Image (cartoon, rainbow, N blue to C red):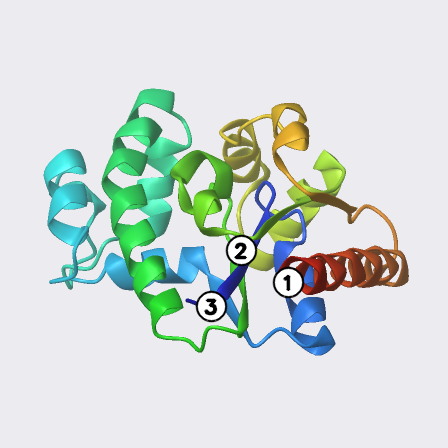
Amino acid sequence: MAILLGITGNIASGKTTVGQMLLELGAARYIDADLVVHQLYEPGKPIYAGVVAAFGSEILTPEGAIDRRRLGNIVFNDAEALRRLEAIVHPAVGAAIAAEIQAEPPDAILILDAVKLLEGGTGALCKSRWLVICEEEQQLRRLMERSGFSEEEARARLRSQPPTAPKLALVDEVIDNSGTLEATRAQVEAAWARFQQGLATASQP
């Protein structure tokens, strides 16, 4: 089984940036849990029928695909709806990611980027868990710029995110992405060195 390094953090905190830096440092592969979800939402895939049954045909495009933005506008404004969605999504995503890990060489280091790494259970598969944080206004700006959300849509998504403070005791590293890219890179390089040292120590007889 491959070695899994998990990156978590709330939406638009900079997890992808940190993941790309880790690839540059020698990680073998980057798995984006959100992309896995995208794939599982496709008609005929595991969670498609469950999501449509739970939220109705109004979340579908004219072509029959799940409209993620429309679905998001429902669940990010309704905590109970979000819990129902996550109960459908998390088990399927966990199974898909576990299958991907099993298919990789045992010494390969894979990066898993997942907002709900700790809440969804995939964190248990990880050798190390990192939390990426940044200022909320930076998250808001990034969401609006990269996804074309209105400020209202972006703030709804931010409100739906779990609080960061309780996660601090559950992770091995915290990367503060509020500053420059250079500052983030320095933190990532230092954390990567500690991670590699931990692997080396664990492999000693």
Label 1: which secondary element: loop
- Measure the C-alpha gap from mark 3 to mark 1: 20 Å
Give neighbour class at mark 2: few <14, some 14-19, many 20+ (Cα, 10 Å).
Answer: few
Q: Which mark is residue 75?
A: none
Q: Is residue 58 above or below residue 76?
A: below
Q: Position of residue 187 (x, y in %)?
A: 84, 55
Label 3: which secondary element: loop
Q: Is tag 3's residue or tag 2's residue first in the polypeptide sequence?
A: 3
Q: Nearer the viewer, mark 3 or mark 1?
A: 1
Q: Which mark is residue 2?
A: 3
Question: In the shown orientation, is residue 144 left or right of residue 118?
Answer: right
Front residue of 173/127: it is 127
Q: Are marks 3 and 2 in contact (CB under 8 Å)?
A: no
Front residue of 136/125: it is 125
Task: State the image quarter where residue 83 is shown.
Answer: top left
Front residue of 99/89: it is 99
Q: Amino acid at mark 2?
A: Ser
Label 2: which secondary element: helix
What residue is shown with label 2?
147
